[in-house]
Structures are given as structure tokens and as C-alpha cells.
Image (tube, rainbow, N blue to C red):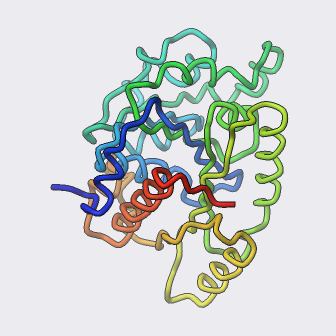
Amino acid sequence: MSLIGDEVRPEARAPTRRARIVAVANQKGGVGKTTTAINLATALAAAGRPTLVVDLDPQGNASTGLGIEREQRRLTSYELMLGEAELADAVLATAVPGLSLVPASPDLAGAEFEFINRERREFLLSGAIRSRVREWDEVLIDCPPSLNLLTINALVAADTVLVPLQCEFYALEGLSQLMRTIERVQRALNPRLELEGVVLTMYDGRNNLSESVAHDVRDHLGAKVFETIIPRNVRVSEAPSYGKPVLIYDHRCAGAQAYIQLAGEILRRTHAGVRPK
């Protein structure tokens, strides 16, 4: 059974010369960042785009949400950044066809101090993955909820940044800081880095505040905001406790359908050569 509508299939099959690497980042916690990473990855894989998720969050929620138990995480993104493991050895298959994972380790929590004296410390992840991801079409890096050395490594390794933004009163607070960080990385470390876009998450249509916030965000950011909005949905919240993306747990629910639409929108933009300005 196809999760992605036929209207995005021709674009999804378009050939690529190498993987496109997307950092899913927001320094604010609780915005649906990991949920977006694993469900968007699932939707892209279902669209015929072999996809790799790199879990760079010490909490390892993306690994748990994709059903990878802690005892399975023998080699992780931590060993990759240390140079103690090759990408091919750290990659694990998931229950989702076409979707692979590099799991996270709690040891990443000390990376800020452990890597601080390393030469070219901002390039540790880039050196470990950029030339080694040709078997995938899409690579999504799930960043920690902070602008630390791990997130900088993700931005240096990435081609684009996808920013999940919760529909709440303080939605825009801190976003300007993230944008400034992206601009600094562009200037000093990774000139190819672009903004993939901003996706509004946890939208509640019954709440006037959600509508007001969505309107304000679009006024501020314009075409940088995806048309697709991810609704607040109980099935999305339940799915991680079963070790499944919501698209597998209940693909008919509103949250799953929204991530399918988001994947279609991203593929259409990508293959049309469109980038939000």
C-alpha cells in the first residue's frame, strides 16, 4: 500500500547524483523536531527515496521512535564523530522499507567538552558522512534541542536546514537566533547551506491562538514557511511508545496525512529547483 499519493511519484523517482543532507533543527525543545524527522523520513522512503536518519540527539528519541532498542546501538553517531567507526558499520535497518538509521548514544551529551580541542571540530560529522551517503537519496539529521557543537556539526554537514516551529505564543522567540547561527555557518564554515523551510507543528484548529500564530509566522517569514501544517494529533503522540512512526502506527490519522503532504511539498520544491527566499 502506498503512503504517498501518485501525484508526487514521478518527482520522487527523479535521479540524483548524491544524497541531499537536511539538518532538522530548532534549539527550542518540544516543537516536534524528532517527530518531524522520523515521520518525514518515513514518508520520503515510502515515496521511493531511500532515506537515512542520523540521530545526533543524546536523548536518542529518533532511535527509539524508529524501534531501535538501546542494546542494538553498538555503534552510533558518537563513534562516527570520534572517527572510531565507519558509516557503513553504524547504519541499522529499520522496520520501514527504504529507511535506515544511525542511532544516537548518551555519550553525545559530553561532546561539547570532549571535542572542544579537536582540530576542525565543526567538521567531524561532515567528514564522517558527506562522501559516504551515495546509496541514499535523502539524509535527515535529527539535531539536539540546543545550538551546541553537535548542531553546528549538523549544519556544516548539511545542504539545507528544516526548522519545525510550534504554533504557540513564543513561536518566533529564539528563531532569530537560529537564523543568525545559520548565517554565521554559511559565511564561515558551509557556504552551500540553505534554508529548506519552516514547518508549523502542533497546530490546533480549535484554538484561536494557533491560527493567530500561524498568521504571524507567515507574515514574518513569507515563502520560507511550508504550506503544509502539522496538526496536534493524539496518534502522533502515541506512536513513539510503540517504536513506530505515526505513518506506520496509523497512516490514516490527520498527523500522518500531514507528513505525507509535507514530503510531497518538499519533493515538488526540490525537483522544481525552488528554494524559499
Q: Residue at coordinates 51% horizontally, 37% vertically from top-left?
A: 20
Instruction: Give x and y (percent) for residue 253.
Output: 30, 70
Instruction: Give x and y (percent) for residue 101.
Output: 41, 32
Q: Is residue 207 left or right of residue 7?
A: right
Q: Nearer the viewer, residue 23 or 203?
A: 23
Q: Is residue 143 left or right of residue 206?
A: right
Q: Nearer the viewer, residue 248 or 24?
A: 24
Q: Quadrant of the N terminus?
A: bottom left
Q: Residue at coordinates 63% horizontally, 28% vertically from top-left?
A: 108
Instruction: Give x and y (percent) for residue 70.
Output: 42, 30
Query: Can you tell which quarter of the image residue 220 is in?
Result: bottom right
Q: Nearer the viewer, residue 135 or 10?
A: 10
Task: Please say if 189 is above or below 83.
Answer: below
Task: Please say if 79 is above or below 147.
Answer: above
Q: Residue furthest left?
A: 1
Q: Residue furthest front?
A: 272
Task: Please say if 208 is above or below 261.
Answer: below
Instruction: Give x and y (percent) for residue 177.
Output: 82, 54
Query: Can you tell which quarter of the image residue 77 is in?
Result: top right
Q: Is residue 260 left or right of residue 87?
A: left
Q: Residue at coordinates 27% horizontally, 57% vertically from top-left?
A: 249
Q: Residue at coordinates 29% horizontally, 37% vertically from top-left?
A: 98
Q: Residue furthest top?
A: 84
Figure label count? 0
Task: Please say if 24 is above or below 51.
Answer: below
Q: Nearer the viewer, residue 29 or 26?
A: 26
Q: Quadrant of the C terminus?
A: bottom right
